[in-house]
Image: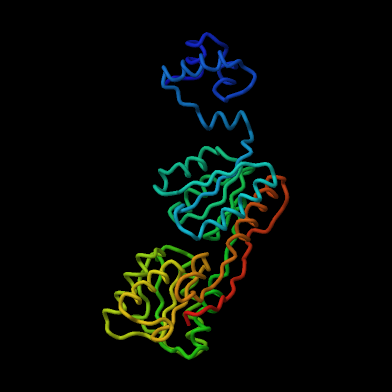
């Protein structure tokens, strides 16, 4: 494998000059830069990210690592992080963790190619995060609590959110409440289900195992889960979808089958994504503080970079948003 010394030798320049050229420094002329870049291309030279970062010490960049960049949930979260970065003259790299341990996102963690990272990605294991955690490299996780000196957690009180959703359905007279679940490996989903069970128990409603129907937080899975419910020819009083996207998929299934919401069945979602207000009927849901989560997470990153002491765990509240689907 070619080294920077090989590039410098082929280009006929000093190693320091080659380094400046490869890092796009204004300390070298355009002519020299082109000569070095051509040499690097000829030798198929790959810059060593670890070595470069050790030399630079700071990148003035923060990574936001998400399990998937395509969902509508993320836009407000990203805006909160972006505004915090801009206010501190830092750049932001938002990247997907699709591919797990082989993803580019994990490379940013392992090679410390950024000054800190915010992580909301169930497909990145605890082991990978623990491996990346070290002094001077702040990590904030948004989807789990981890017991480590160099890892902070910002979580939403999903137990309370699940409780609020279920309690509202009960107070509207519903006694048979289906829970359309997200992925089993999602802590958020587990906690929402825990809140759902807590409300049923407090209101003396016996949970039936058949009331839990699997989904995976996508609109398609909500559609399919609802079709499964309808296939049983026993329409329930109400359905609590563990996120809004699945609830919107459910609305489509009900519409196709001539079932009226809320006339025939009440439904409630979770997240309060932007589109939930504009579907027909507008979706009653649990609002998550998405922007506030991102804003707090990036604030904690900068506090840690300044050497300030902060709490290990922060928990944000949810709230019920009443519209027309219940």
Q: For this rendering, which residue is in front, 34 or 254?
A: 254
Image point (33%, 73%), residue name: 253
Q: For this rendering, which residue is in front, 278 or 180?
A: 278
- Image location (x, y in percent) of residue 261: 41, 81
23 versus 163 height, above or below: above
- Image location (x, y in percent) of residue 72: 48, 59
Q: How is the image coloured?
A: rainbow
In the current view of this chain or complex, which residue is farthest to the top?
12
Q: Is residue 291 left or right of residue 242?
A: right
Q: Residue 256 falls in which quadrant of the image?
A: bottom left
Q: Quadrant of the N terminus?
A: top left
- Image location (x, y in percent) of residue 236: 37, 85
- Image location (x, y in percent) of residue 13: 55, 10
204 versus 181 height, above or below: below
189 versus 131 height, above or below: below
Image point (47%, 73%), residue name: 269
Q: Residue 230 falls in which quadrant of the image?
A: bottom left
Image point (40%, 71%), residue name: 181
Q: Is residue 275 left or right of residue 233?
A: right
Q: Is residue 72 left or right of residue 137?
A: left
Image point (59%, 31%), residue name: 54
> Number of numbered discs present?
0
């Amino acid at each position: 494998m070619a080294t920077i010394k090989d590039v410098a030798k082929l280009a006929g320049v000093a190693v320091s000059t080659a380094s400046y050229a490869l890092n796009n420094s204004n300390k070298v002329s355009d002519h020299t830069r082109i000569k070095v870049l051509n040499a690097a291309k000829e030798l198929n030279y790959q810059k060593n990210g670890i070595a470069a970062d050790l030399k630079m010490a700071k990148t003035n960049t923060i990574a936001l690592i998400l399990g998937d960049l395509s969902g509508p949930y993320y836009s407000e979260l990203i805006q909160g992080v972006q505004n915090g970065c801009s206010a501190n003259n830092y750049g932001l790299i938002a990247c997907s963790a699709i591919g797990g341990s082989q993803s580019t996102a994990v490379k940013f963690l392992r090679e410390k190619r950024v000054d800190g990272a915010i992580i909301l990605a169930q497909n990145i294991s605890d082991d990978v995060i623990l491996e990346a955690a070290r002094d001077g490299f702040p990590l904030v996780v948004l989807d789990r609590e981890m017991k480590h000196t160099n890892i902070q957690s910002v979580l939403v009180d999903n137990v309370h959110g699940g409780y609020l959703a279920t309690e509202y359905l009960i107070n509207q007279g519903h006694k048979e409440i289906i829970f359309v679940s997200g992925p089993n490996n999602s802590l958020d989903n587990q906690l929402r289900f825990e809140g759902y069970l807590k409300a049923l128990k407090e209101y003396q409603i016996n949970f039936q195992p058949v009331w839990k129907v699997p989904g995976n937080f996508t609109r398609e899975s909500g559609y399919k889960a609802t079709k499964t419910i309808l296939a049983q020819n026993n329409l329930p009083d109400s359905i609590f979808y563990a996120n809004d996207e699945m609830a919107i998929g459910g609305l489509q299934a009900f519409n196709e089958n001539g079932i009226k919401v809320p006339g025939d069945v009440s439904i409630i979602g979770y997240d309060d994504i932007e589109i939930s207000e504009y579907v027909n009927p507008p979706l009653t849901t649990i609002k998550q503080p998405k922007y506030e989560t991102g804003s707090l997470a990036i604030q904690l990153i900068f506090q840690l970079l300044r050497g300030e002491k902060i709490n290990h765990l922060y928990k944000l509240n949810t709230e019920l948003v009443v519209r027309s689907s219940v």
